[in-house]
Amino acid sequence: MPIGKYIVDFVCFEHRLIVEADGSQHAESVHDQVRDQWLEAQGFTIVRFWNVEILKTPQIVQDTILARAGLPC
């Protein structure tokens, strides 16, 4: 989903929440740091998960997303 000049994986505009599913290419990425700072300055909260986390512990990922959105798990 495009936001400004960036593309995010998933966004909930109602809760100003961005969820990113990342592979190893994102480890310590300066581009991601700059991007995240801009998105946070726009009022978004960013939650990042490694792809392996999503595959191995989907319930934890789901609960984390719901908690960050302020919704019951």
Image: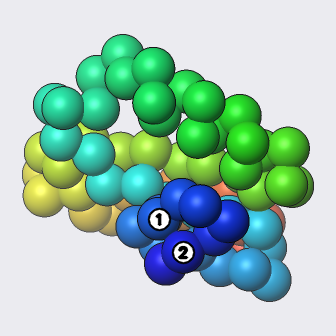
Image height of 60 relative to 16, above or below: above
For image coordinates 16% across by 31% down, the residue present is 24
**Judging from the image, what secondary structure is the residue with disc 2 in?**
strand
Q: Earlier in the sequence, mark 1 or mark 2?
A: 2
Q: Label 1 belongs to which residue?
A: 7
For image coordinates 65% across by 78% down, the residue present is 12
Q: Label 2 belongs to which residue?
A: 2
Tag 1 near tag 2, CB within 8 Å = yes
Q: Kindly identify the amino acid type of the residue bearing the numbered disc 1.
A: Ile
Q: Which mark is residue 47?
A: none
On the image, the x and y values in percent for residue 41 come to 85, 44
C-alpha separation, residue under disc 1 versus residue under disc 2? 4 Å
Image height of 23 relative to 29, above or below: below
Query: Looking at the rendering, in which quadrant would you find the C terminus?
Result: bottom right
On the image, the x and y values in percent for residue 45 come to 72, 51
For image coordinates 35% across by 45% down, the residue present is 49
